[in-house]
Amino acid sequence: GYGTGSLPRIDSLGSRLFLIHLYPELSTVPSSLRPLLPKLPSRTRALDVGAGVGRVTSDVLLHLVSDVVLLEPVEPFVQQALARCRATTSTELAQRGQRPWKGLADGSKSVTILQGTLQDFDPMNPHRVTFLDRIGYQPPKPLDEINMGFDVIWCQWCLGHLSDQDLVAFLQRSHVALREKEKGKSLIVVKENLCQDMKDGSACTVFDEEDSSLTRSDMAWKTIFKQAGLRLVMEQVQEGLPEGLYVVKMYGLR
């Protein structure tokens, strides 16, 4: 992890570019990828699972979508995410050298913070988690959003805490929750550390006894995606991270 500050800029920029490449309508500036007249829902929605203190939400997703739902199971992490989110309009945040979360102070964007586990979470029926707060934009009918689904479901550095069986089930539930999948727009992004495949090219999974997590190889991930019925549309290694760490790879799935 990277402590309690922001993500390394190279990581957050890599994530944004990857997402824009697959969903160019989300681009906020004119580019060769962005359609001249992008057709988007009135408000775009992202789900950030295993979100920790909210770095992906603040450094990636709020730059591209209207509303983010943040899900984190660990009490200290989710409370810190909540505190950072609530403090984004205060002068105290700037004094601590932290950037405000985009769009919350003016009410143009929102973050909803939930506490719960991925094993119990159904993105379309989020009844087995605890609602903590919604900061920023407030919809006229909040309950209408419960079964609305998502344009982007982002999973970064958290899926190693799920068994293969739980992971396949979670990805299947997530696929059901993509609201523009018939149009080839909405997607799931998995961004995780990779270990090496076996010498014969077969899948490999390494168990870390310190944090009881699994590090999967490229083939192990692709086997999981196939079992979940997902289509891999793009894959890319995150460049520019410090040497000596696991390779980090992004997978775009529909």
Image (spheres, rainbow, N blue to C red):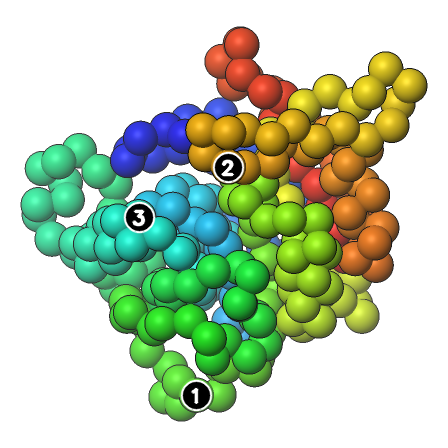
Q: Are marks 3 and 1 in contact (CB under 8 Å)?
A: no
* Residue 225 point in image, percent of width and height: 78, 49
Task: Say which residue appears at 51% left-offset and 29% top-offset.
Answer: 209
Q: Is residue 103 above or below residue 176?
A: above
Q: Is residue 104 above or below residue 22?
A: below
Task: Say which residue appears at 46% left-offset and 75% top-offset.
Answer: 128
Q: Could you tell me how far apart the alpha carbons at marks 1 and 2 are, in whole angstroms?
A: 37 Å
Secondary structure beneath disc 1? Answer: helix
Q: Is residue 100 above or below residue 120?
A: above
Circle 3 crowding by C-alpha within 10 Å: few under 14, some 14–19, many from 20: some
Task: Say which residue appears at 67% left-offset and 68% top-offset.
Answer: 173
Q: Amino acid at mark 3?
A: Phe
Mark 2 against mark 3, which lies toward the viewer? 2
Identify the residue position indicated by label 3 in the image. 77
* Residue 25 point in image, percent of width and height: 64, 56
Residue 143: which numbered mark, if any?
A: 1
Q: Quadrant of residue 149?
A: bottom right
Residue at the extreme top of the image, as rendered: 243
* Residue 131 point in image, percent of width and height: 34, 73
In what quadrant of the picture does the N terminus appear? top left
Q: Could you tell me how far apart the alpha carbons at marks 3 and 1 are, in whole angstroms?
A: 26 Å
Q: Would you say 44 lies left or right of 182 here?
A: left
Going from N to C along the chain, the mark reached first, 3 or 1, is 3
Q: Amino acid at mark 2?
A: Ser
Q: Nearer the viewer, residue 98 or 147?
A: 147
Identify the residue position indicated by label 2 in the image. 212
Secondary structure beneath disc 2? Answer: loop
Q: Would you say 211 lies left or right of 185 here?
A: left
Q: Is residue 142 above or below residue 238?
A: below
Residue at the extreme front of the image, as rendered: 209
Q: Quadrant of residue 198?
A: top right
Q: Is any atom of residue 39 visible in this view? A: no
